Amino acid sequence: MTRVARIAFALLLAATPATAQQVSVDTGRLAGRTIDGGVQAYMGVPFAAPPVRELRWKAPQPAAQWPGVRDATQAAPMCLQSGRGRTMNHYFGNEAVSEDCLYLNIWTPPGAPPPGGWPVVVWIYGGAFSVGSTSMANYSGANLAKKGVVQVNIAYRVGPLGFLAHPELSREGGGHSGNYGLMDQIAGLQWVQRNIAAFGGNPGSVTITGQSAGSMSVGTLQMSPLAKGLFHRVVGMSGSPMRPRGAVPLPEAESQGVALQKALGADGIDAMRDLPGDRVLAGAAGVPRDALVADGHVLTGDAKATYAAGAQSKVPVLIGFTNDEAFASLGQVKTKAQFQAAVRARFGKQADAVLDSYAPKTEADLYRSLNDLQRDMSIGQQVMGWATAQANAGSPAYVWQFARRQPYASGIRFADHDAATAGAYHTGDVPYWFQTLDSLNMFRTTRVWTAADRALADQMSDMLVRFARGDAPAANWPQFDPAKPQLMWLDLEPRAMDWPKAALVARLNPKPAPRVSAKRRARD
């Protein structure tokens, strides 16, 4: 070999990521890569067969065996969905999309595992059951792995390809249909039980974690008889199974599926399977459809009834919400007078009590008062309901309220996010839990992170790891007690405190109104 060739070869080796240790799973051998800090990453690992052609709208099927060693250094495409523009708040680069998307990503700590293996954190993404990806940079498991857990990010079908009921599908499925995305999540958890020990993980110590629709998912998995025994703790960020409109009855969901069939001009499910996936996605845009279905198979009852019957998985939960998110709206309120009128219209006999607690003293207080009420009458009350059901069942619950407003770069603009008014927004806590703050500056400087932000991210990721190990998330974190509700206020100086307005939050009872459109929140 000439000197030039030797130099070229050396440069090639230097530019090539170090290959991680090979691992055998039940379908073959994998070779991942070693990344920063000695973390081993295995990307794009199949846990089910591609849900395409005749497997569209079917329960996930076993993945096929492969010969030799499979390259596991690149992430798989995300499930078919709309793309992200470069001026969106959560833009982490373009990702390929495909119906062939049932893959997971794994990050393992450096070094040898302890006796029994590392605890496992399974991440289930949010996105209103319509979008989401295992490989977004703010969901990276590298930093949690450095702290001693195996992180697994599971993909699941979204939109009409993941959540569609139809009479023909119910006949095919033995009397039930819909919830295919939830079944994907369960199949991923079953894969973890079969295979995670090969990566040094402990299958007896699995924490399922999700945000927004991912949090609704983990809360729903806690209710599902099909998921029992697959996990041992739950972390739910900004989503709760205790929603006013939970899973819809199967006949209603089937009628929604028939409406989509008609919108697509198809004569049945076989014809719908013949259509390109993007046609189905486009056709569903104008057809109202609920994601979760009370199908009698994956979901056998609503959350309150399931907990009342003691039929849920009785495991500890760590749950909470952000200070400036809301899943309900009082409408266009721009003055104190409009605030009072909106409260009286929505709360009836309860209006005086609501105004005593929430009415703004000055016009300058209007935003804070309006946001606090809209938050508490939706996600705040729903999280409290989840925590109360836990406590009544004798299972521990730990609750937080995240209040840190991210330090935006001067003059930064987003297509879907107003930095001036966003506050501690929906999804704004995620990069703190995963210690992935720098992911938000991948292509342009959108935040000017401070040492205090980095310290908070270090603390919050420690809390998540402590909980995954089976401990309280922090030594001073109170367990939820319905008789004296407390939570952890997560800001630059976290502290335990009484739940603000807890007695009223528990009994807020507004008249029903249309839900807030997902377009009003930064995309998860």
Image: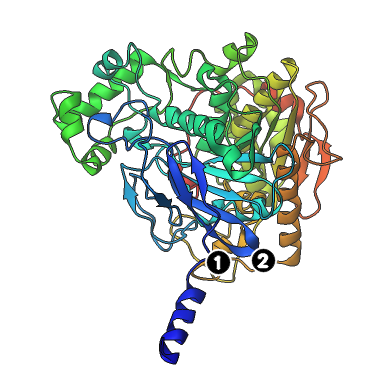
Whether residue 425 is visible, yes or no, is: yes
Quadrant of the image for the N terminus? bottom left
Point 55% across, 66% down: residue: 441
Residue 251's tag is none
Residue at the outermost top position: 309
User: For residue 199, what is the image quadrant?
Assistant: top right
Q: Eyeballing the image, is 43 above or below 333?
A: below
Q: Name the residue beneath numbered marker 1.
A: 441
Residue 374 lies, in percent from the top left, at 60, 36
Label 2 or label 1, whichever comes before in sequence order: 1
| Proximity of marks 2 and 1: CB atoms separated by less than 8 Å | yes
Residue at the outermost right position: 476
Circle 1 packing at 10 Å, graded few (<14), some (14-19), many (20+), is some
Whether residue 407 is visible, yes or no, is: no
Q: Eyeballing the image, is 388 above or below 3?
A: above
Residue type marked 1:
Asn
Residue type marked 2:
Trp
Query: What is the secondary structure assignment of the residue under circle 1?
Result: helix
Circle 2 packing at 10 Å, graded few (<14), some (14-19), many (20+), is some
Residue 420 lies, in percent from the top left, at 58, 60
Q: Name the residue beneath numbered marker 2.
A: 449
Q: Eyeballing the image, is 471 above or below 388?
A: below
